Amino acid sequence: MTEKISIFDVEISCIKAKEAMMQAIEFMKGDSVNTIELVSMESLMKEHENPEWKKKVSMQDLVLPGSVEILEAAKADDARLLRETDNKLFLRMFLKYLQKNHHKIYLLAASQEELVKAEEALARYNQGIRVVGDAVIHLEDGELTDADRIHGIVNAVNGSEADCILSVLPSPAQEDFIEQNRALIDTRVWIGCGSVLMRSFDDRKMTSRIKRMLVKKVFRYKVEKQN
């Protein structure tokens, strides 16, 4: 299949985890922040009529599918790519790379509960991850509102000397944050995970699985309708 697919006019790279890792490693060698987004099916569903969100996603340096349902809806037939995406292989490899090279992570979330869930998920992926700081960005109607607090968080990130910011903020706040603060952030990589980081563990719950099946059906219908 082609190396990119378009879902609701959002271009997503369809590359193997090894190739994505090679790009991520190059990003880690850079002097300015590079951005990676693992776009989720839920974000695409929620923001598919939001042109500003689509524009901000397109500005990321590397956009990858965060769930296998995205590839399935695009009728991808590369079994290896489907399997790697379903297993979150790139995310696992990237976190392992950070741990092995003693790189430092700063976590961002929209609530204390989400922050705790993200920390638990990181521990399950790799217990050696170095989290040097975290912050909760409270949202109002899903949007960033407290400019002073955000400015303080950017300063805290830079003061922590983190190598990577890992965001589990929901869309569109996740994309708004990095678009507004990219020039101010002194890290090597920003990775926007949204719900992708925690979802593999949440999906074990029966209620989450049923809800996801329903969302998947609606998502497929909407994707087919756009074509």
Image (cartoon, rainbow, N blue to C red):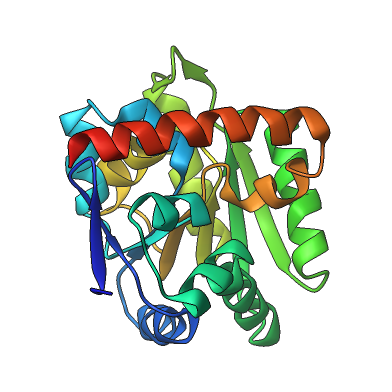
Residue 108 in view in this figure: yes
In this image, 212 relative to 170: left or right? right
Q: Is residue 127 above or below residue 209?
A: below
Q: Residue at x 70, y 60 (%)?
A: 131
In the rendered image, residue 123, in percent from the top left (x then y), is placed at 81, 61
Q: Is residue 37 above or below residue 112?
A: below
Badge count: 0
Q: Nearer the viewer, residue 180 or 39?
A: 39
Q: Quadrant of the C terminus?
A: top left
Q: Nearer the viewer, residue 62 or 14?
A: 14
Residue 173 in view in this figure: no
In the rendered image, residue 188, in percent from the top left (x then y), is placed at 41, 71
Q: Residue at x 75, y 41 (%)?
A: 202
In this image, 149 relative to 30: left or right? right
In the rendered image, residue 73, in percent from the top left (x then y), is placed at 38, 49
Q: Residue at x 41, y 39 (%)?
A: 174
Q: Nearer the viewer, residue 143 or 170?
A: 170
